């Protein structure tokens, strides 16, 4: 069954970063360097998250949570942290060696209440890793240099292993470690709509492209969501209208849209689902006007990851 300790993990306001705009035509104007720096930006985010979390949550906290979640919990989280720090070093070296300029970690991040306890920490880690998997899956097709394609694929495989482990220890061990036969590639602007909600100040970085992204999306339902439950969105922009809009659920290779007025979580979601607001009945991400939000269904119940 679902532990309520996982619900309501974060509440990060849209005022933390600039209001997004839509319509950026070319997400990677500098080619492979832009893509590698996009990946490095995400790896900085993940590495920083784990480094802070492991410094704030002691062995005792992990040991106590491990009675419900998994043995050797902190040891495995340390392995994940080591991997993310290695990814940062690898991408930094690869970009520099090829004559590019690598992006730095942001000045400040905001992880909300993720470090209040191990349960919150695991829930946010789970969301970050799933986002990372979808980010690599979405960006890798744009890489032109074959060596970078291989490097990106090998990192993506490890991110997927992280995701599977965190799924398995979520919801008191009831999370499905590998729910679908396929993952969901996310376009870069939707990845940023998720990832940048953790950013408080990134004015110091030399991020080498400007990519617009949809307004943030949150779910207003109270408590744990269930399959078939009607959900309501809150959009972090008054410019977005829900009139005639659709709720689109993206999971595995499925994009299922229903009218906003009857926005129900599909019955066959068994694991993650990205939730977006679309301007039409969509089978892809071309009409997204807000989001995504990210939710997880564990044993028939959906844990909302609140950003």
Image (cartoon, rainbow, N blue to C red):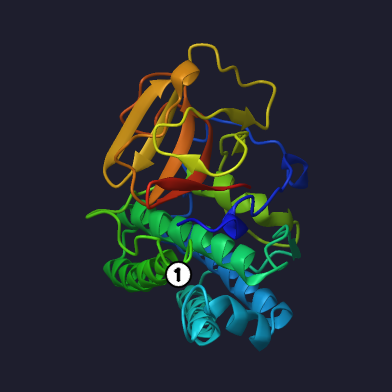
Q: Quadrant of the N terminus?
A: bottom left
Q: Residue furthest left?
A: 181
Can residue 51 be seen? yes
Measuring from the top left, give residue 135's x and y in whole percent.
Answer: 43, 55
Residue that appears at 69% across and 75% down: 52
Measuring from the top left, give residue 26's x and y in whole percent.
Answer: 46, 41
In this rendering, is residue 66 above or below 266?
below
Residue that appears at 59% across and 17% down: 241
Name the residue nearer the viewer: 106 or 126.
Answer: 126
Can residue 189 be seen? no
Measuring from the top left, give residue 273's x and y in whole percent.
Answer: 41, 44
Q: Where does label 1 land, which residue?
A: 169
In this rendering, is residue 53 above or below 206?
below
Q: How many discs appear? A: 1
In this rendering, is residue 115 above or below 286?
below
Residue that appears at 52% across and 69% down: 100
Q: Is residue 239 left or right of residue 267?
A: right
Task: Classify 10 Å Cα crowding around label 1: few (below 14), some (14-19), many (20 and above).
Answer: many
In this rendering, is residue 307 above or below 103?
above
């Amino acid at each position: 069954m679902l532990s309520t300790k996982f619900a309501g993990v974060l509440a990060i306001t849209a005022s933390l970063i600039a209001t997004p705009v839509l319509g950026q035509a070319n997400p990677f104007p500098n080619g492979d360097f832009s893509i590698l720096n996009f990946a490095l930006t995400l790896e900085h985010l993940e590495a920083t998250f784990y480094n802070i979390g492991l410094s704030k949550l002691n062995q005792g906290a992990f040991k106590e949570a491990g009675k419900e979640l998994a043995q050797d919990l902190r040891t495995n989280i340390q392995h994940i942290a080591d991997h993310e720090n290695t990814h940062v070093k690898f991408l930094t070296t690869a970009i520099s060696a090829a004559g590019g300029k690598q992006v730095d970690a942001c000045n400040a991040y905001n992880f909300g209440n993720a470090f209040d306890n191990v349960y919150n920490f695991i829930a946010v880690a789970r969301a970050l890793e799933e986002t990372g998997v979808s980010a690599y899956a979405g960006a890798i097709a744009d890489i032109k240099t074959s060596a970078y394609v291989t490097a990106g694929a090998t990192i993506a495989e490890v991110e997927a292993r992280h995701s599977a482990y965190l799924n398995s220890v979520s919801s008191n061990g009831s999370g499905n470690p590998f729910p679908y036969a396929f993952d969901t590639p996310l376009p870069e602007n939707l990845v940023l709509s998720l990832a940048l909600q953790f950013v408080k100040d990134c004015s110091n970085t030399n991020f080498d492209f400007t990519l617009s992204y949809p307004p943030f999306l949150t779910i207003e339902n109270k408590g744990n969501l269930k399959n078939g439950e009607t959900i309501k969105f809150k959009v972090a922009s008054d410019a977005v209208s829900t009139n005639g809009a659709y709720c689109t659920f993206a999971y595995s290779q499925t994009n299922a849209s229903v009218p906003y007025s009857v926005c129900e979580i599909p019955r066959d979601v068994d694991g993650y689902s990205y939730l977006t607001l679309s301007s039409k009945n969509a089978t892809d991400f071309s009409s997204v006007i807000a989001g995504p939000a990210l939710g997880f269904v564990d044993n028939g119940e959906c844990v909302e990851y609140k950003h």
